[in-house]
Every structure is written in structure tokens, then in C-alpha cells.
Image: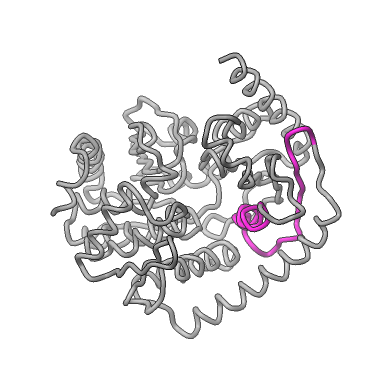
Amino acid sequence: MELEEMIDGNFFKLVDDIAEKFLKNEDGRKITVVHHNDADGICSASILKALLESLNADYRMICVEKVYPAVIKKIHEDGEGVYLYTDLGGLAAEIIERYTGENSVSFIIDHHPARKVESEKVYMLDPELAGISGVVFISASSLIYIFSRRINPEIEDYAYIALLGAVGDYHDRYGGVLGFDRVILDEAIMKKQVKIRLEGVKERYYLPFFDDYADTVSRKLTTLGAAGYLEKGYLDGIEVCFNGFTERTLEKVRRLEELKEEKFRKEIDRLRSGFNETEHIQWFSVENRFDPMGVKTIGEFCQTIKDMTFVKQDKYLIGFQNIPALIPDLGEIEWRGVKVSGRTPSQLERMVLHGKMPGLDVLIPRASERVGGHADATHKIAAATVIDIGKEPEFISAMEEAIKDETSKNSRC
């Protein structure tokens, strides 16, 4: 059965509309791809690279950890062209529109909660705007795969890359990938790119190309892109998607994993003595202690510790990490900020998913807005934003207030 036959035709109308607009605007113009630095972002960029090269397009790639005004302004400094944001940007559409020049156009192809803009300069393709969960049913790389495959059917050769991105974004958390990710898995199986193997009640996806499992490969991609961000490890990640690991890239992964493990171990030892706490929140700041790793690692760290014994299961977990001034593909940014990452320990996660407690997709954007921050890439159980350095306590107070406000609403329902 063809991919198009297995997915709701209404969704493909949205995809085709964006694909048509992209081809109309792409015609000979310089294209700038802006992507995230985790496995899903790296896989999205890889699929776009394959598409753009098949179109003989003139393109460049910029990898960023977060989008906020200073970064978006810097991205658009070159002036005219087509800008394509993937795996980020859903909540930053208004800012992206502000910096998209009169002779330019921007596309946002993201799977995170988004705010739609009506504009002739910004076009959005986001499943959340169509009522489809981007945290469960479709990753950014799966969305980019579907978009790219509508333009060039030969992109089906890279279904395994879309699967890698979905697994890297924990879309197999419920025993296996679901929804649109599942359809792409089926296509990859038909193309003999993937084999399903069961371990207890959980599926693992064996990739003959790597002679390894998708979860293992995707973790290495995230290590390259996150722990190795400042040394442009994401470029190695893109190369790996097409050509596999070499001894050089494997050695880099080993070195970065050792660095991350050492820094994580030291921070865990420090946190065993206790967090800063409010009624509903436990929080901490690593300041610059994770340098030279990228700020994606504060989210990884929160994910790593959220169910450890010293973490309270009924409180939201918030971590802060100072943002380096240098962005490898852009240079120095004149703004001193902090990355905020939130996670829900498993007990609280169940309450959030059952609607008994508010999700981070509501709380973090609301608190961020109160302190002048810029939230993006938010889900119910994992979310992030950036705020001015020094506003961490103010952010926590705003989030605590938002929790009380939301729980009060729920109690009245």
C-alpha cells in the first residue's frame, strides 16, 4: 500500500499546498535551512539536504539550539532568499515574519505546538495546527520526509532517516512508534531498510545499514549534535545519516559521551544535597558547568535524572543553563540568556497526560512571556524556553503562579 493511501488525504492537501509554495519560491533562489541539533533535527536536515541536492538548489545550513529574536535577526541578515525552519520555530512565527525581508519568504515545518500567522512572507506546516499530536504521532523528520517525498518520490530511499529522528525524539516511548511515524516505519520495512525486533513488550528497530538499532544510533546523533555542538558535531551527524559511522566519528562520540557522563555525574552528586523548591517546582541551575557542551544538554540532563530517587515525583523539574555567546554557524550573538528546560517525573507525567495537572506546553510559554522570554519546542511533558540571564527566580515565580491558576480552573470544571 502506498504512503498516500495510508494517511488522511486532508493532511496531504496541507502538505501539497506548502510543497507547491516552496517550489514556486525556490526557483533558483538561495535557500537557508535552519534546524535543531538533536537527532530529530539532524535527521530532518539530512532529508532536506537530499531533497535540495536532487533539485540542484543553492543552499546553506544553519544549526541552532533555540530560536529567539537575536538569533533570528542574525539568520536573516543576508537579506533575500528562502528560509526553511525545521524542528523549531512553531511558536516563533511572528518573530520570523518580523525579520523576513520584503523579497524573502520563510517556511516553518515543525511538529511542536505552534501559533499560526496569516502572512504572505511566512508559511507553516505543523500537525499541531491540524489537531494532530506532534509529541506522539509525527516527528519533525517524519514530517520533513512526507513533505520532501511529495516533491521527489525518490526520497523514499531515506525512510530509515525519518525513523531515526522519530526514535531519537522518544516517539517509541509507548512500546513502538505510532501514527504517521508508524506509516513511515512500514514503508522503511517494505524497502528492507528496517527490521522490527521485540524485547519484552517494546519494539526495537534494527537498521542493516548501520548494523545497529535505531535507539542506539539516534543517541549517538544527539551526542554529536548536543555535546558536540560548539565543534559542529551536527555536521558529522548529517554525514553519518548517509554514509554510516567511521572510526573518526565513533571516536568523537566516545569522547563526547565520556565528557557528558563526567559532567552529569558531578552535577548529580551536587544535586543530591537538594534542589531549590516551591510548592510545585524543583529547580536548579548548572550555570556554565556544562561548557563546552551545547544547551541541549540541560534537557538531556533533566530527562536523565527525572525519575532518580532524589527527584520528587510530584513536582515539575526545571533546569537552567547559561547560553554561550557563540553560535557556530552565525558567530557572536549580542545577548546574554539562559536556556530553560522542563520535564515531568513519571508520576506527575501520568497526571499531566490524564488532564489532572497542567502540561509544560501551557506553563512554560506562559511563564516565559511574563518575563519577556521566548518559548519554542514545547510539549506537555517536555518543554523549553530562553530568558534573560538573572531572571530565573522571576520565571519560577511566574510558573508557580501559572500552575495555581490552571489547577484552580481544573477544580472548577
Q: Which is more toward the observer, 400 or 102?
A: 400
Q: Quadrant of residue 259?
A: bottom right
Q: How is the image coloured?
A: one colour
Q: Position of residue 350 (x, y in %)?
A: 56, 40
How many numbered marks are there?
Answer: 0
Q: Which residues are magenta?
A: 278-306
Name the residue: 63% across, 43% down. 347
What's the residue at 49%, 33% (across, down)? Answer: 95
Q: Is residue 401 above or below residue 396?
A: above
Q: Position of residue 71 (x, y in %)?
A: 55, 45
| Residue 1 x/y as whole percent | 13, 54
The part of the image, by quadrant, that contains residue 187 is bottom left
194 or 261, nearer to the observer:
194
Which of the image's four quarters has the C terminus?
top right
Rendered position, 198 above or below 2:
below
The answer to whether residue 382 is left or right of residue 279 is: left
Residue 304 colored in magenta in the image? yes
Residue furthest out toward the front: 200
Q: Position of residue 322 (x, y in %)?
A: 71, 50
Taking the image as shown, residue 49 lies to the left or right of residue 225, namely: left
Measured along the vertical axis of the image, is residue 56 above or below residue 137? below
In screen coordinates, is 182 left or right of 217? left
The answer to whether residue 412 is magenta is: no
- Front one among 371 and 267: 267
Q: Residue furthest top?
A: 412
Q: Could you say which quadrant of the image residue 158 lies in? A: bottom left
